[in-house]
Image: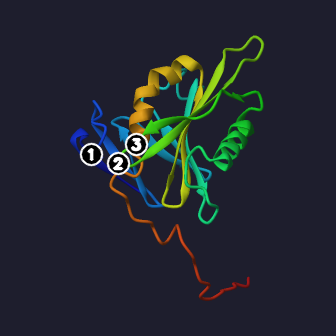
Amino acid sequence: PATTVATPAELPTRPAHKGSIYQHPIGFQLWHPEGWKVEAQEGLLRLLPPDPDGGEDAPNEVYLLIGDSVEGEGIDAPDHPAVTTYLDDQVHSISQALTRQGRPTAVPMARGTGARYEWRAQLEGQPEVTARAFTCIINGYGVALLGIGIPNCLDRREDTLRQIFASFGFGAGKKDPALVGSWTLVSTVSLDN
């Protein structure tokens, strides 16, 4: 994956800040503000703000990019029941206490429309926790930008998250054939000690 510098004029939503474009191996791009980092982590991407609430060691907010292939499954919209079930499962793997709030709402993107989901949890003696997912279907993949944290952190980042999400698919990228696609076994090599 590569990151290149982008200016606000190159983005469909005209963000107020300079940023970078991240090229994802499945063939789409996303913009993130200057100072944010994109870090690969166990099959997903983590977006790191420059000033995480609570600090880097114990942040009160976490932002992840998750996704899975929907090729051949008849899923053509981000509010499809199978997408909702998938997102519920992903969020519940983080905390069973998180409960989805209402139905997904439409969110504009550079190309098409995505959906915004929200979950909340209130545990006794703990601050409320919110999870928000902005999701879409791109190049045969369901992709979601998921934020989890205390509500005021997510509220503070809402505009930035919408700008990042709106950039999904902007300037459709190329798939990296070394990472995404079908592979053929050429040979097997065995070493003996």
Q: Amino acid at mark 3?
A: Met
Return the residue at label 1: 6
Q: 26 and 84: which one is in front?
A: 84
In front of the other: label 1 or label 3? 3
- What kind of element bears circle 1? strand
Where disc 2 sits, the SS reads strand
> What percent of the width, then of the height, locates residue 116?
54, 35
Mark 2–mark 1 CB contact (< 8 Å): yes
**Considering only vertical position in the picture, is 176 above or below 152?**
below
Residue found 68% across the figure and 49% down from its top: 82
Q: Earlier in the sequence, mark 2 or mark 3?
A: 2
Dot 1 amino acid type:
Ala
- The answer to whether 65 is drawn above or below residue 106 in the figure is below
Give, as a three-letter code, the residue at label 2: Ile
Q: Which residue is mark 2?
A: 21
Q: Quadrant of the N terminus?
A: bottom left
Q: Is residue 163 visible?
A: yes
Look at the image and tell me in which quarter the C terminus lies: bottom right
Looking at this view, is 124 or 13 the one in front? 13
| Quadrant of the image occupied by residue 54 | top right
Query: Which residue does the numbered mark 3 point to in the structure image?
Result: 109
Q: Position of residue 21 (x, y in %)?
A: 34, 48
